[in-house]
Amino acid sequence: MEAKLFTIKCMTNLHVGSNTEDYDIIDKKVQKDPLSKTPIIQSSGLKGALREHFKHHVLFSAGTNEEGLRNKIFGSEKANRSGQPLMRAGFKILDAQLLFIPVRIIKGAKPFMLGTTKVLLKQLEEICKWTELSPLMNLTSADVKKNFTGNQKMETEYGEFNHYYECTIYNDVYQFVVIERDDLAAELFENLPVIARNKLDNGESKNLWYEEVVPRNSVFYSVVLDNKIYPEINLDSYFKAPLNEKIVQIGANASIGYGHCKINF
């Protein structure tokens, strides 16, 4: 089975809703991994967003049965009323896992820096291993470790850091710190930005609610697997090429600019 890993960089705030009710002060929370409690994009939602992108923005060669090709890539849609038999998806898409998220700097030259945790790095390592993907790189090896200017410390909401790491994943360069303490890492994901939303009727508030978001500049990654069901399609030509370095809208609130994400292979 062939596999390819791709990154999903949030160009704007992202809200992929959990659709769960827990009577918390936050009305609409984002999807989170049930074990690590880190933000994720579940595969069903990611697949649906990519399918919509293909439907409206991807054109294959002249004379191609576009709908039939999309069905081979993503599988038949459930609302199939044409009498055609349902088709299995040629490609499997895994949940998108978080890799980096902005961390606010209290004392330093920048307003924020990307952060990650030991758990997130371990997840990446494990996914690369079981999908038989070569690891992107050792993201925290000595050769990508750098000191801040003048060997100063950087103070964030989640501790002080003497150094950071810099790496290139595909065409993007990332500078990030690793939050080592598990309690601070948990606090990071419990305190995602919350935005107040309101519905006005003739200037009068009719429905005030609070919505959790994954902030812009966060980076997820996912893996696509080729089931080798359809020999006439392959990952490079029919998945990577149409999506690489393209902007795809994922999640809710598209009309107010949420969920614009850059895909990189």
Image (spheres, rainbow, N blue to C red):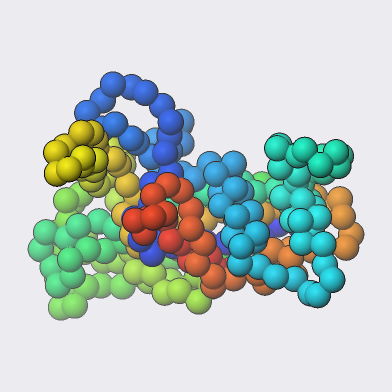
In the image: residue 256, left or right of residue 96 = left
Query: 165 or 57, which lies in front?
Result: 57
Residue at figure coordinates x 46%, y 48% from the top left: 251
**Quarter of the image where the C terminus is located:** bottom right
Residue 217 shows in this picture: yes
Residue at figure coordinates x 34%, y 56% from the top left: 256
Instruction: From the top left corner, tell me how far across and down residue 208 is, in percent.
Output: 21, 35
Instruction: From the top left corner, tell me how far across and down residue 109 is, in percent.
Output: 14, 72
Instruction: From the top left corner, tell me how far across and down residue 210 is, in percent.
Output: 24, 37
- Judged from this view, the residue extending furthest toward the front is 202
Residue at figure coordinates x 39%, y 69% from the top left: 174
Quarter where residue 2 is shown: bottom right
Instruction: From the top left corner, tell me how far across and down residue 114 is, in percent.
Output: 31, 61
* Above or below: residue 260 compared with residue 41: below
* Above or below: residue 53 compared with residue 84: below
Residue 129 shows in this picture: no
- Judged from this view, the residue extending furthest toward the right is 231
Residue at figure coordinates x 21%, y 40% from the top left: 201
